[in-house]
Amino acid sequence: MVPPPAGTALNAMATSAITMRNQQQSPLLRLPAEIRNMIYAYTFGSVTVRILKVDGHCYYQGHQSQWSKPSVWKGNRIFSLTQVCRQIHSETCLMPFEMSLFDIKSACCLPGFLNHLSIHQVGAIAHIQISEQLV
């Protein structure tokens, strides 16, 4: 299949064909869901996202990634597995928030960080650690 020209959206038929091809040819997607979930848990369960203020700017860091401003959160490689294809996205989109530890080093940065997430992502955050003294 030839990709569409830049700037054009895929039609439903092309999207369906890509989805079907992924399901049939992807070694990961051919695994049973239970095994994929174990892989996802291994991938996201060991992530710590640190949120802190440096030189007056708020940053976050996860895994071995570089420090990034929260505005680039969605494009960061910390949770890039969730963006591989539609099926993996639907299976994993909230897992990083459910399984990762969010370590708040600068509480003043927390509101700005949360504002860059969807309400579903914020609601899925299960583990928060506050390392800053809030006195």
Image: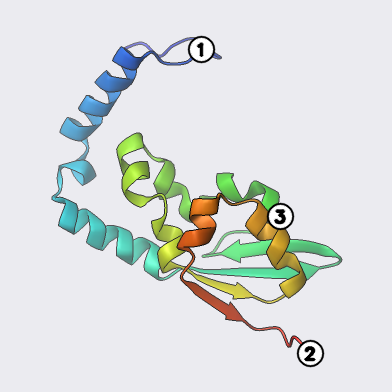
State which tag comes first along the sequence, 3 or 2: 3
Task: List x then y, in percent, for residue 125.
Answer: 49, 65
Residue ID for mark 2? 135
Secondary structure under badge 2?
loop
Residue ID for mark 3? 69
Task: List x then y, in percent, for residue 115.
Answer: 67, 53
Q: Residues within 10 Å of mark 3 (few under 14, many from 20)?
A: some
Residue 75 as seen in the image, left or right of residue 79: right
Residue at 44% in and 59% down? 96
Residue 110 as seen in the image, left or right of residue 37: right
The kind of residue tagged 1 is: Thr
Secondary structure under badge 3?
loop
Q: CA distance from mark 2 to mark 1?
A: 53 Å
Residue ID for mark 1? 8
Task: List x then y, in percent, for residue 95.
Answer: 39, 58
Q: Residues within 10 Å of mark 2 (few under 14, many from 20)?
A: few
Farthest residue to the right: give it. Answer: 56
Q: Are marks 3 and 1 in contact (CB under 8 Å)?
A: no
Q: Residues within 10 Å of mark 1 (few under 14, many from 20)?
A: few
Name the mark nearer the viewer: 2 or 1: 2
The kind of residue tagged 3 is: Lys
Task: List x then y, in percent, for residue 47.
Answer: 46, 68
Secondary structure under badge 1?
loop
Nearest to the observer: residue 115 or residue 104: 115
Q: CA distance from mark 3 to mark 2?
A: 26 Å
Q: Are marks 3 and 2 in contact (CB under 8 Å)?
A: no
Nearest to the observer: residue 130 or residue 57: 130
Nearest to the observer: residue 101 or residue 6: 101
